[in-house]
Image (cartoon, rainbow, N blue to C red):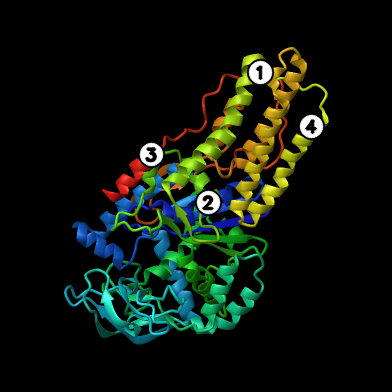
Amino acid sequence: MSRVLTAVAWPYANGPRHIGHVSGFGVPSDVFSRYMRMAGHDVLMVSGTDEHGTPIQVQADAEGVSPRELVDRYNRVIVEDLHGLGLTYDLFTRTTTGNHYQVVQELFQGLYDNGYIIAKTTLGAISPSTGRTLPDRYIEGTCPICGYDSARGDQCDNCGNQLDPDQLINPRSRINGETPEFVETEHFFLDLPAFAEQLNAWLDTREGWRPNVLKFSRNLIDDLQPRAITRDLEWGVPIPLEGWKNRDDKRIYVWFDAVIGYLSASIEWARRSGDPEAWRKWWQDPESEGYYFMGKDNIVFHSVIWPSILLGYSGPKPQALGGLNLPTEVVSSEYLTMEGKKFSSSRRVVIYVRDFLERYDADALRYFIAVAGPESNDTDFTWSEFRRRNNDELVAGWGNLVNRSISMAAKNFGEIPAAGELTAEDQTLLAAVRAGFDTVGQLLGKHRQKAGITEAMRVVGEVNKYFSDQAPWKLKEDKARMGTVLHVALQAVQDCNTLLTPFLPHAAQRIHELLGGTGVHAPMPEIREVEDLDNGLTYPILTGDYTVGTKWEHVAIAPGTKLEAPTPVFKKLDESIVEEELARLQS
């Protein structure tokens, strides 16, 4: 058994999240974590809502509420949505906790003491109409390097280079289109160039990374520049230095505090577990592994900036928390589009997670993301393809097999029948299904989830073929052979259910019960209201007991287990849903 940290990108708390978001950070991280737990690893899966920065302030102003009121509202919305999807966080918290502030300030201070944070006078962007600082991401213009006309003030998505807002040609505010004013202001910068050699050496040791992530990361290191980690802002973590800590106009930049959330959430989890030092097992044991899940727009923060922070804090001078492990792998997904267009809340090209879950099953979305999501290429979500995948694969393929095998056994025997002498066909099928534990497991361990679920469904297809070829409904005159065929089919169904459990946990629990199983097969997260460990405020977290549940292995079914006539596990979707959903997009 090894310890595995699943570090999941922090959704921003300025609104509800849509299915494009969870296709990158949410479902892939949960599939991986569920599999690793089933395979016997000690998993710590952490994240939370990212709640600082000017965009929060801007949104709060627009809604006439305080930043705290805004993030309190959307923190709860996001927690409920991720709970609905069945994402098994050991702790899903938030960045406005006292614990998070302390950890962020500790890493800032450690980097400062080690000489990796430097003060510089720079040009800051100010909104002429409000006098407020404009965040880098709220400024667009033409990239001075490649000429892309929609580059952001922090980086160009076209060429990947880091930028400062004043470098943009014809900069404009994304809030109201006005031209920002640039004024001198003093800020602290992380000395990223100091880590270039160490980062290159570290990337040389990375094996099995998705090629796009590794190539993109290497290209960034070629031209590293010091990066600002403070901002002229009222909402955020205070700067923990004399002369700065009590200022109400300077705060730590949101991207710096958010990546530290992986560590602060681990520490909060440990404090809540009753063993405040437990986090060290995942962060300091050289045998522990850490996997970071996100969309591709966040690669730079996880493959360059976060490793630099970890390297800088860990040396040369020892710091209070000690040395910290670098990521084992940065697992980045590409973009999911919708009906051929980029997701856009303002343009109503969107379906939010909670709206989706009000109309469709969570496992239907989980299945689509796993089998057709943006694992290694940009992919398009269409309602017609969603309906086809649901009906032809989940309902007709897997659900129908479950239903007819259990129905026939329940009708003819009332229980799982015993097996007689097995034929070559019986043995071949059972061996093929059992082999799936190795093939599917290896794929999931390497983050090839699309190939993993495709292989699992191929095995389901083999079972369907066996069932059709053996035609147990024709064996009423040979009850012993009918019982053997149904026993073999039910054994295969149980093993296939285990193979599909990381992807379809809600259905897996239901199928476990249809087969006469009791107890927890696929554990689920719970929402728990807790009190902040340091300031007394209350908020919801996601957590759960994931020590229960099935293991990643063949388990023999028990003849004599009572069976009832099943109800369908999956819902067939009418053709009308396509027209209805497209009409919603256009309304």
- Mark 3: which secondary structure? helix
What is the distance, in whole Å, between disc 2 and disc 1 at their CAs?
A: 37 Å
What amino acid does circle 2 point to? Answer: Ala
Residue at image mark 3: 577
Instruction: Report how far apart the C-alphas of labels 3 and 4 lie in the structure.
Output: 41 Å
- Residue 159 lies left or right of residue 500; in this view the side is left
* Spot occupied by residue 295 in the image (x, y as percentages of width and height): 48, 62
Q: Are marks 4 and 2 in contact (CB under 8 Å)?
A: no
SS at mark 4 in the image: helix
The residue at which mark 1 appears reads as 415
Residue at x 56% of width, y 19% of height: 565
State the residue at coordinates (41%, 57%): 340
Tag 4 residue: 425
Residue type at tag 1: Glu
Picture coordinates of residue 218 (x, y %)? Answer: 57, 77
- Proximity of marks 2 and 3: CB atoms separated by less than 8 Å: no
Q: Which mark is residue 372?
A: 2
Marks 3 and 4, the one that precedes in the sequence: 4
Query: Comparing marks 1 and 4, which lies closer to the viewer?
Result: 4
Give the class, few, some or many, for how many residues have Cα within 10 Å of label 4's Cα (few <14, many ≥20).
few
